[in-house]
Amino acid sequence: MQRNAMDDLIKWKNKKTRKPLLLYGARQVGKTYLVKEFAKKYFKDIIYVNFETNDIIGKIIDENISPEYIIKNLEIAFNKKIDKDNTLIFFDEIQKNTRALTSLKYFYEDAKEYYVIGAGSLLGIHINKKDFSFPVGKVEFLTIYPLSFEEFLINTGNDLLLEKIKECFEKNEQMPNLLHEKALNLYYDYLTIGGMPEVVQEFISSNSTINAIDYQKAILESYKNDITKYSETTDAPKIIATFDSIPVQLAKENKKFQYKLVQKGGTSSIFGESINWLVNAGIVNRCVKTKIGIPLKMYEELDSFKLYMNDVGLLTNLSEFPIYLIKNREAVNETMIGMLTENYVASSLKCNGLNLNYWKNEFDSELDFILQSKNGLIIPLEVKTSVHTKSKSLNNYLKEYNPKYGIRISSKNFGFKNNIKSVPLYAVFCINADNLDID
């Protein structure tokens, strides 16, 4: 269960002025399951319409998109009354019915007392089409991500360990060595399994990494099927080639995205829209180079960026990374395991609502991530894969910009020394825009 997303849904339900809610997220991140669980716990009833499978409701909405007409016909179709205070109306795969998307505007204007949620695997693709008029300002948005490592710990029955991690993060106190090693081992499981709910569930129920990996392969195949099905015929090969190049891009010491690695002679004019498609579909996250200034958004260099997979387990699978090398960390090249580590950190930060930026100066000092707190504090973050944490880049940044402090992610225990907050790999989920403003 995506606990943070459930909290967001509860907040939406309790708002006095509420708009229809649209859920973004890649295929199989658990949007449908989440909303159904939300309805089960906080509503007496649910009207569930999947526009991929329910042609009848689709045709009804094609005829008339006024809320009064839709509600009346939903009651007839489902043979039950819709109670505005106790019934959730859930339009799934809503991108398949443009009229249903448009109807959300009128639910807000004429029937805002009803609880309405829409969701779709490729909603971001549909909404960003040039020929689609979206009801701006009439809906709210919530992005659903794969399960974080925090949620992985909950699902694997490690709640007490989770609480200890949070406590040590807040107090900069070391974890007992036994617990530290246990948390690290669970983290390395997560590098292989990732956070796609179905994959995690299979890993737990079967106690088999191999079975879980088979589910990952099916998800990756479904992504490529979606690309073929929902993109323009001439664009599909370019999008798939861009997608397949991600392991190659991240395996480089310089992880900046290079079009020539997708195809010899590749340029942004050829593959730029392919990247946008993958980002809008929620399949990849883009991390943009930035200069240092407040706000970071105004200093981004948009032509320099890295692409990370939305889920580290899918990257491990797409890379065909041998599982035994993840477990036997000493036997693998640090750059190779580093790409998984960076991807894990990127998806963790994104899940916590932080924008993804990195920094590099003219002297080739580079930091993996630059974070901005809610109060505008700029914090450098360096990622290391092991206990070997010596690096000139973070020290150079600290000397040049004199930030309040820096963060170093590694397999070392918690601590705070020389103005650097040490955060173990398993505790990245603790970092968010609120707690960056430490005293």
Image (tube, rainbow, N blue to C red):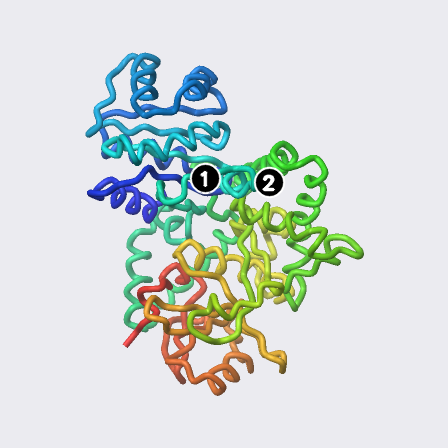
Tell me: residue 176, above or below residue 271. below
* Left or right placement of residue 104 versus residue 314 in this view: left
In which quadrant of the rendered image does the N terminus lie? top left
The residue under the point 61% across, 57% down is 325
- Is residue 320 or residue 28 the one in the foreground? 28
Q: Which mark is residue 379?
A: none
Q: Which-is-in-front pick, marks 1 and 2?
A: 1
- The residue type indicated by label 1 comes to Phe
The residue under the point 48% across, 30% down is 98
Where does residue 278 sit, x and y in percent of width and height? Answer: 58, 47
- Is residue 189 or residue 152 the one in the foreground? 152
Give the quarter of the image for residue 353.
bottom left
Q: CA distance from mark 1 to mark 2?
A: 29 Å
Residue of label 2: 220
Residue density around tag 2, few if under 14, some if 14–19, many if 20 or more, within 10 Å: some
Q: Secondary structure at mark 1?
A: loop
Where does residue 297 sit, x and y in percent of width and height? Answer: 47, 66
